[in-house]
Image (cartoon, rainbow, N blue to C red):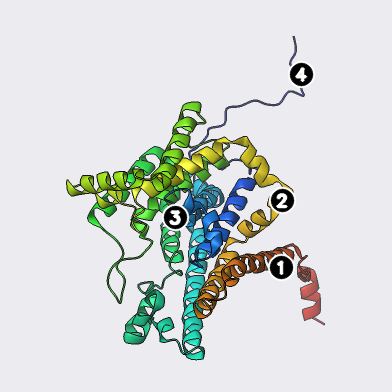
Amino acid sequence: MTQSSNRPNAQLIPIRRGVDLPRRARDPRIDAFRGLALIMIIIDHMPGNPWEYLTIRNIGFSDAAEAFFIMSGIAAGIAYSPAIGRWMSGDLRLWDAIAPLWRRAWQLYIVHIVLTVAAIGLYAWAADTFVRSEFRVMHNLALLYEQTGAAMAGLVTLGYQIGYVNILPSYTVLLLAGPVLVAAVLYAPRTTLAVAGAFWLYAGATRLTIPNHPGGGGWFFNPLTWQLIFVIGLAIGVRHRKGERLVRNSALLFKLAVGVLLFIAAWRYVPGLGSFMNHKMAQLGGIGLPANIVTHNKSMLALPRLVHVLALVYVLSCLPVVTHICAHRLAAPLRLMGSHGLLVFGLGTILALAGQIMMDIEPNVTALPWILPPVAVAVCYVAALLAEASRKQPQPKQPAAATAPRPEMVASSSTA
């Protein structure tokens, strides 16, 4: 029996650790949930509005910040792991692998500086225009006027941060460490997650943080503890790119996660249960358990907040209907805003701070808390539409490079 000549030549191809896989279709959940988290951040950054009751923080302990970090980690794992993997397999130079991460970190740093300066200017203008001196002391702004030189130096070095404009520094630091974190997740994901968890526990127990200067204290979003949720997101993103799950889809785990979410909701709202649980946590703290285990501290990414967001992510990831909803045309605005996340975050931050000022100036205008958050979200959506239109606009063709003359033509012209 003869072998057909059309049969493909089958051969064993060695698979090296970190080799990139074919690009998969973009998961609509990533942009949709990132867009939703950004909308919640805009709403929550205007305290006192009725829309706050619809955000994630009212169903548990975590809020849009945890969602932002884990979604950012997932997106980073998907986007940056191929280049790091190619470097690990010897197919790419080290700089070419790490440059995209560091360029993004630099971009975030610049955006943070611009947002901080814009916020300072906005509150200074409000203080002068409305003769309200309190606008010069809100959100840690007083240090700028009391220790101007130190505050300006701290602004550049990220040691001086003002309220509501303090999440990007931690994300910037994590992206600077991104090449090491991504490589570790690719090489030994379980070990990396264990080390990240142990470091989270150590940093929380010892209150290890990056110090503020001036003013003392530490960063509100402590990257030494928040790294854990970012690394978990990276591991999810790396597995997702390979068409795999970080944690298997299990009926038992799903029921356990739903049970955790229900218990946390009861902790929040059932009379007596919350005070009982908080008292028990205080007792555990009294016998020496670390503060990030027995409190709800946001800077430390305390355990109740971490457990809540991870349970929520697991439940949502196990429901096929969630993918269909996120892919629906009605979810297109969320996906669009999520795909232009940095633009929406930056613009939304400024609009939210302006909304704070307006509601402080006119506390008796009851319509403002109802109107301002939706208007801010609508403006951000329009900005995302314009950015998308600009992205899709055809680029002008570059003029063709001049053809180099043949050697004989050069010789003939030189003798003319």
Which of the labelled discs sits on residue 386, or is there none? 1
Q: Is the residue marked by circle 2 packed among few (<14), some (14-19), or many (20+) residues within 10 Å? A: few
Residue for badge 4: 4
User: Tag 3 or tag 1, which sits nearer the N-term?
Assistant: 3
The answer to whether residue 370 shows anywhere in this view is: yes
Which of the labelled discs sits on residue 178, or is there none? 3
Find residue 324 and report its horizontal and vertical position in percent.
Answer: 67, 41
Q: Is residue 134 left or right of residue 23?
A: left
Q: Is the residue marked by circle 1 packed among few (<14), some (14-19), or many (20+) residues within 10 Å? A: few
Circles 1, 3 touching at the beta carbon (< 8 Å)? no
* Number of numbered labels in the structure image: 4
What type is the residue that disc 1 sits on? Leu
What type is the residue that disc 3 sits on? Gly
Q: Secondary structure beneath disc 4?
A: loop
How far apart are the two marked residues, 4 and 2, measured between alpha carbons?
A: 52 Å
How far apart are the two marked residues, 4 and 1, measured between alpha carbons?
A: 57 Å
What type is the residue that disc 4 sits on? Ser
What type is the residue that disc 2 sits on? Leu
